[in-house]
Amino acid sequence: MEITSPYGYGSIVPLEKHYKVLLPNLPAAGGGAVPSFAGKMNAMTISSAEFAVAGRDYPVVFIRLESGAYAPLVVLGLSDGRNLYVVDGHWIADSYVPAFARRYPFCLSQVLLDGVAQADKLVCIDQAYVDAAGVALFAADGTPTARWSERQRLLAEYEGDIEATAQMCAGLDKLGLFEPFTFQVTNGLRTQFKMDGIFRIDEARFIALKAASHKALTEKGWAARIYAHLFSLANFARLHQRAQDVAAAEAAAKKRAARK
């Protein structure tokens, strides 16, 4: 049996009821400690259900996967390996934390038997978080505790949202709404930063859709997601400003350290 491990996880094992587990405290509103991989991601996948809340803080864009399908993510930094919203191992307060990070150290993993993917996914945990000093997720009679019920609900909702997101992206692709674009920061004639390979919804094509298509998009809730995505693109300016603020703070800290 093979178990696929999500990005950033260490060795994962199926969750057993007798395990005691170290539970991170990472609220959706930020302010909590994050897994180490989250601080090294300048972009993070999100589900369509997160567009409205994530779009208040970050640009929501799309990428094209090797399969040819599209998937949404939030942009969190302007350089590789740097999440500007993680400081000293903590996601800054009052900034939305995607469910991708909040579900850690748990995940629903695809199981392969003799190379064949099984229909049911397995609840797994990063083995490093199985610890005798942790908390029990199940009572002695095997019933789930409130802590596990909360985590289990997050996993189930996230998995369902990811499937719904894939359906939405396939539908938008069928309508020909995706267009490539480039985000670029320049200083005079010099390019300081360039991000390409990303996609957005072509607003003109969206507006030009037939009334029946607009009705279908509205009824499915996809139109609201499209507007949230389009509005969120203004956050590239906020992201650039944050990058400048972080760089200035780090430069000032280095100067203070040099004086000591």
Image (cartoon, rainbow, N blue to C red):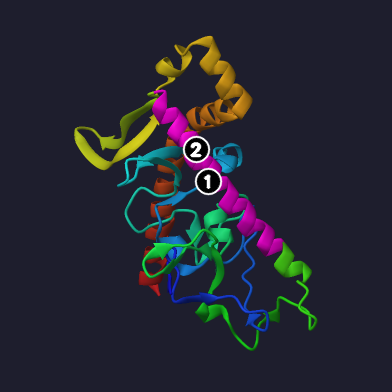
At x 56%, y 38%, the residue is 51
Q: Amino acid at mark 1?
A: Glu
SS for dot 1: helix
| Residue 168: in magenta span | yes
The number of numbered badges drawn on the structure is: 2
Task: Report the magenta residues as a range.
Answer: 150-175
Query: What amino acid type should be assigned to the residue bearing mark 2?
Result: Gln
Give the image location of residue 89, x and y in percent.
51, 67
Helix, strand, or loop for circle 2?
Answer: helix
From the viewer's perspective, tell me whether residue 127 is left or right of residue 137. Answer: left
At 44% from the left and 11% from the top, the residue drawn is 208
Q: Which residue is mark 2?
A: 167
Say whether marks 1 and 2 touch (CB < 8 Å).
yes
For residue 57, above or below residue 22 = above
Question: For residue 81, what is the image quadrant?
Answer: bottom left
Which x, y percent locates residue 125? 55, 73
Q: Quadrant of the N terminus?
A: bottom left
The residue that appears at 63% across and 24% down in the rendered structure is: 219
Q: Is residue 129 magenta?
A: no
